[in-house]
């Protein structure tokens, strides 16, 4: 399955809408209630949300798949000229696929394929920030074989290995002091590894706690391709095509969640995530050709928090409804705010529903509206700044089957 | 209950969803009135760059950029005396050395070339053919009838020239309405509501670019500080007499421009080369020693004059007319360049590389600024700048610290919209090929400084220009 998926996955555009370039859309049910799911079981998607919970539920085999359609727009108002510009992003389509199998009462095996990081931002070839970024497409596909173990009726643990295929492509103008701007295309990919571990505890019949840690993954691109397009032949010798190395760190995320069953029908939950973005200090391109100056791009991200609340209401045997809200703090400091990942503090409002058809089959739908709050920031190293704001509407669909 | 809330939320999401909407940037003229703007100054106001005034340079002149932005807050038309035809496209330069030969140059452009050693490089070349001075002057017919002009920038003008009705300058001649019109009177005749005044650069520049050797009393000498103060205050008084508001800019330290910082003041040589040179200068050094033998007081000057080369880095040998004239002893007035001294951009690179300039042959003094000359330039600039700043403060006018901006370009450089600028010639992106005048993007950087100063002084909100949207120096294929 890995072999089949890898080439396919690389071409699917994703879109950044969480802090930094994190994409939190790993389950349609969870998305419908504020992307909560660390402390209560919602099927095979626990493989991602908290691997400790994979053995919960009464089914031996569960499979769950889904995806989202992201429609987003970022507006930038240049702080110098007052001119407004907008992204023209393609519809992003992150997806997920989970399967769990109970080997025995204690042990459950699972496999997850999901895309927790990614970004496709298209500003255009001739906008005022073209020397920083014209467009970027960043994807990270995680494949995660996982095991969970029930220590007792109340306490369970789980962990998985994350095999990560990271790839990206950047286009930007390369300003030159004479003649016409050159153009540079950077692309590369790499396989890296990380892990996802969790613990889950039922305090009592009503109250449960979950704690997960998803490790940092350094996507080390070795031998990426830098391709220059130079208009003036007099400048061609300064811009030979070159290999390059670069490292993109995907941050560790630690989440603590709690869930409370208010009644048979109503469940409420809250979570806090700590995302260690401070590991993203700089995005540096080290070019093999000496004539091209190495490109150092300080990012200096700061650790950030995400707070989520949500509720699920079992309306009938057939339908569950969900609502949620989250506040996702931007990891980016005011003087390092780059149009490549233009993420201010985000407010997410969500709603969702699930339908059950018979014992085995179910479908899910969610809608998420994200307000990227208005923010006056600059990327000081490049002397480029202004006001940014964004909006995203994300619809999600999912299917599940279990027996 | 939850479901009912959901039903309310969904349509709201669908309606407001998809597009963020940032309020438009507020624009305002503040307490100023830009309905008629007049710009008074020299080549920097006219739009001079790469050694000439051309139509392209005029269209992208500093005051034209300002006027275009002011238009967004109620500014009026900005009429410029555009050059046309061959003069418009090839430009008209005012090079003192060439003028003496009866020719006037065209503008510089970059082209692939080879130096005297045959190494390929990109270097400046002149556009088209030079003009014969007489023919050019006849060709520069008066355009006064198409006036009045909002741009009263005349390349080459010193401060005292703006009130001189007999000012002999072809760029002034084509604008002049009738005697006794002056640059300043044509400006005040516009009854402008706003003015820019950036003048004084030529009051030091001519002295500096000619290597400082003409002396303070010559035609390219430094303007006396007291004369400058009186004339500057009179000019500001005339421009503000009708209550107009305006902006003044100070004078960059000319030694921070690439005209003086591009040509290296020394070179690296091998031991055999050093041995040959030392042997060649041994009679000169010996002659100095002999003089010290006759007169011990000559020791200090002998130490200054003695020439010595070693393996590795050495400074060049130059002619210094300020040294004691020893020609009767058969000794030339030469020495090696000292730290902090500068060579002009006009020093021929090919002569250094292939004709032994600076090593086997001394570099002529008119390409060399001595420490004493640099000090004179610096003192004059400081005094002019004090006058300018005081005039801005006492008249409540906006003030642009162009000197600090140029210093920043020469030291740390600046980065705007991902483009790095420095005062390096060609690669720095801010200066045109003459090493004195900004390139179009350099003018845009300064235009934004003018806008900042105007905005802060008059509480205005004039949007700035997009520096990166202006073209770079053209490379001829």
Image (tube, grey):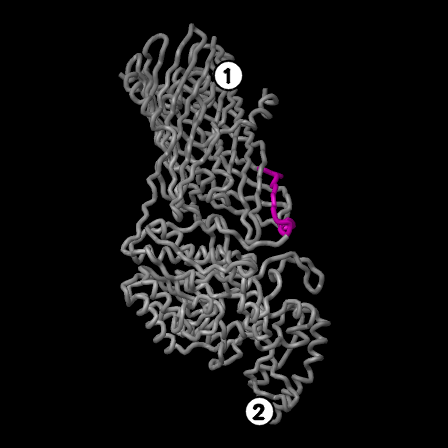
- Residue at (59, 19) in percent of width and height: A1
Q: Mark 2 — residue?
A: B296
Circle 2 packing at 10 Å, graded few (<14), some (14-19), many (20+), is few
Task: Magenta stretch: give its range.
Answer: A221-238
Depth check: give the residue in front, B353 or B294: B353
What is the x, y in percent for residue A192? 56, 32
What is the x, y in percent for residue B319? 60, 79
In the image, residue B145 sits, relative to residue A366, either above or below, namely below
Mark 1 secondary-structure assignment: strand
What is the x, y in percent for residue B163? 38, 73
Q: Mark 1 — residue?
A: A99
Depth check: give the residue in front, B177 or A295: B177
Res B238 seen here: yes
Depth check: give the residue in front, A203 or B199: B199
> Which chain does the residue under circle 2 lie in?
B
Position of A6 with respect to B455 (left or right) is right
Residue that extends furthest to the top in the rendered view of this protein: A358
- Residue at (60, 21) in percent of width and height: A4
> Which chain does the residue under circle 1 lie in?
A
- Residue at (52, 38) in percent of width and height: A248
Asked if the stretch drawn in magenta spans residue A233, the answer is yes
Circle 1 packing at 10 Å, graded few (<14), some (14-19), many (20+), is many
Mark 2 secondary-structure assignment: helix
Depth check: give the residue in front, B225 or A53: B225
């Amino acid at each position: 399955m890995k072999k089949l998926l890898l080439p396919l996955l690389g071409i699917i555009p994703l879109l950044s809408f969480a802090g930094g370039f994190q994409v939190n859309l790993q389950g349609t049910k969870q998305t419908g209630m504020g992307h909560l799911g660390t402390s209560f079981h919602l099927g095979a998607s626990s493989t991602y949300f908290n691997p400790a919970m994979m053995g919960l539920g009464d089914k031996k085999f569960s499979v769950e798949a889904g995806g989202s359609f992201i429609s987003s727009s970022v507006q930038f108002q240049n702080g110098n000229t007052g001119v407004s510009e907008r992204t023209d992003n393609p519809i992003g389509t992150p997806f997920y696929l989970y399967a769990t199998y109970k080997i025995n009462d204690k042990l459950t095996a699972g496999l997850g394929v999901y895309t927790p990081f990614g970004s496709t931002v298209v500003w255009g070839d001739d906008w005022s920030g073209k020397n920083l970024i014209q467009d970027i497409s960043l994807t990270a596909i995680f494949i995660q074989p996982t095991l969970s173990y029930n220590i007792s009726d109340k306490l369970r643990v789980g962990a998985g290995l994350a095999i990560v295929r990271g790839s990206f492509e950047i286009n930007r103008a390369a300003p030159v002091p004479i003649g016409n701007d050159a153009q540079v295309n950077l692309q590369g990919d790499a396989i890296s590894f990380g892990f996802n571990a969790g613990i889950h505890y039922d305090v009592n019949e009503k109250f449960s706690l979950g704690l997960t840690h998803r490790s940092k993954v350094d996507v080390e691109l070795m031998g990426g391709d830098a391709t220059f397009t130079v208009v003036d032949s007099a400048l061609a010798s300064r811009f030979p095509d070159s290999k390059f190395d670069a490292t993109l760190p995907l941050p560790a995320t630690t989440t603590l969640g709690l869930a409370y069953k208010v009644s048979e029908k109503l469940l409420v939950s809250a979570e806090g995530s700590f995302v260690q973005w401070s590991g993203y200090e700089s995005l540096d391109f080290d070019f093999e050709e000496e004539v091209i100056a190495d490109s150092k791009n300080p990012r200096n991200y700061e650790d950030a928090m995400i707070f989520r609340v949500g509720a699920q209401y079992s309306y009938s045997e057939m339908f569950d409804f969900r609502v949620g809200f989250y506040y996702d703090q931007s990891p980016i400091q005011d003087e390092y705010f780059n149009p490549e990942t233009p993420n201010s503090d985000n407010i997410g409002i969500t709603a969702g529903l699930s339908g059950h058809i018979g014992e085995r089959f179910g479908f899910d739908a969610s809608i998420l509206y994200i307000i990227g709050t208005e923010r006056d920031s600059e990327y000081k190293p490049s002397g480029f700044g202004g006001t940014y704001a964004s909006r995203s509407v994300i619809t999600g669909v999912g299917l599940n089957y279990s027996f | 209950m939850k479901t009912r809330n959901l039903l309310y939320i969904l349509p709201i999401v669908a309606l407001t969803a998809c597009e963020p909407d940032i309020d438009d940037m507020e624009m305002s003229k503040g307490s100023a009135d830009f309905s008629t703007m007049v710009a008074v100054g020299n080549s920097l106001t006219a739009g001079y760059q790469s050694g000439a005034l051309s139509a392209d340079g005029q269209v992208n002149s500093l005051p034209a950029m300002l006027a275009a932005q002011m238009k967004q807050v109620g500014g009026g038309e900005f009429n410029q005396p555009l050059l046309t035809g061959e003069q418009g496209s090839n430009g008209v330069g005012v090079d003192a050395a060439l003028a003496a030969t009866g020719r006037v140059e065209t503008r510089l452009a970059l082209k692939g070339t080879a130096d005297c050693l045959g190494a390929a490089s990109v270097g400046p070349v002149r556009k088209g053919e030079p003009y014969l001075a007489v023919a050019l002057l006849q060709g520069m017919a008066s355009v006064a009838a198409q006036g009045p002009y909002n741009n009263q920038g005349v390349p080459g003008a010193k401060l005292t020239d703006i009130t001189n009705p007999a000012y002999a300058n072809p760029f002034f001649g084509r604008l002049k309405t009738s005697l006794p019109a002056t640059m300043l009177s044509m400006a005040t005749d516009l009854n402008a509501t706003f003015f820019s005044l950036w003048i004084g650069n030529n009051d030091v520049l001519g002295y500096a670019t000619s290597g400082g050797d003409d002396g303070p009393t010559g035609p390219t000498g430094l303007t006396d500080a007291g004369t400058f103060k009186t004339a500057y205050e009179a000019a500001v008084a005339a421009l503000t007499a009708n209550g107009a508001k305006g902006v003044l800019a100070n004078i960059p330290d000319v030694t921070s421009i690439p005209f003086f910082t591009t040509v290296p003041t020394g070179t690296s040589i091998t031991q055999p080369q050093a041995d040959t040179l030392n042997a060649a200068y041994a009679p000169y050094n010996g002659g100095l020693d002999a003089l010290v033998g006759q007169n011990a007081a000559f020791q200090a000057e002998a130490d200054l004059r003695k020439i010595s080369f070693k393996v590795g880095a050495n400074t060049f040998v130059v002619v210094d007319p300020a040294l004691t004239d020893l020609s009767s002893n058969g000794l030339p007035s030469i020495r090696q360049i000292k730290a902090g001294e500068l060579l002009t951009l006009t020093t021929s690179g090919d002569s250094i590389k292939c004709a032994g300039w600076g090593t086997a042959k001394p570099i002529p003094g008119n390409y060399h600024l001595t420490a004493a000359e640099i000090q004179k330039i610096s003192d004059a600039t400081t005094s002019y700048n004090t006058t300018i700043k005081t005039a801005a403060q006492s008249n409540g006018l906006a003030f642009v610290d162009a000197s600090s901006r140029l210093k920043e370009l020469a030291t740390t450089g600046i980065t705007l919209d991902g483009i790095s600028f420095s005062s390096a010639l060609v690669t720095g992106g801010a200066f045109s090929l003459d090493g004195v005048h900004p390139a179009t993007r350099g003018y845009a950087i300064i235009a934004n400084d003018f806008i900042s100063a105007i905005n802060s002084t008059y509480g205005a909100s004039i949007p700035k220009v997009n520096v990166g949207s202006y073209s770079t120096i053209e490379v001829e294929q």
